[in-house]
Image: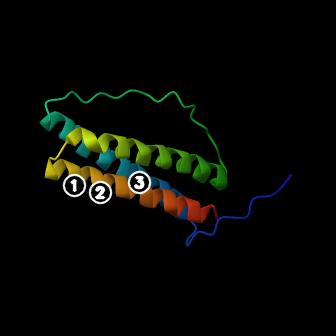
Amino acid sequence: MPTTPPISWPGRNAPEIHFEEEARESFGHAEKVRDIISQLDGEAVTTRDATPIVHAFDTVTMLAEALKTETAAAQQYQKTLPLVGDHPVFKHDLMHIMMDEMRAVVELENLLAR
């Protein structure tokens, strides 16, 4: 069985810090999107994606799963962008969220040496 190279983190608690920061960012994105939907007279609802949640204890698997999630989020924001039309503030906000997600994809790919 091939072995996966170890992940190089800058500090001992780096994986924990990484995932906590990502969670905070995701909640901030959700709040912004909810506000946009509300201002467009829509109703913000949450539906659970059918993709199974993989519970893992090793960092490589956690990062690989995070990569799948961030990639899906970036794609979803790209699809959502046209829904705000030409509204400059909403478009600006969604573009920044999409760029955050795309940066996260690149960061995870780098950590996984892909």
Mark identifier at residue 92: 1
Q: Residue at coordinates 54% horizontally, 51% vertically from top-left?
A: 67
Check disc 3 and report the residue beneath it: 101
Indicate the amino acid at tag 2. His
Q: How far apart are marks 1 and 2 (CA)?
A: 6 Å
Q: In which quarter of the image is residue 41?
A: top left
Helix, strand or loop at mark 1: helix
Foreground disc of the pair 1, 3: 1
Indicate the amino acid at tag 1. His
Of residue 68 and residue 12, the one placed in the foreground of this image is 68
Q: How far apart are marks 2 and 3 (CA)?
A: 9 Å
Is 106 placed above or below 75 here? below
Q: Residue at coordinates 37% horizontally, 48% vertically from top-left?
A: 26
Check disc 2 and report the residue beneath it: 96
- The answer to the question of whether label 1 and label 2 lie on touching residues, with beta carbons closer than 8 A, is yes
- Quadrant location, the C terminus: bottom right
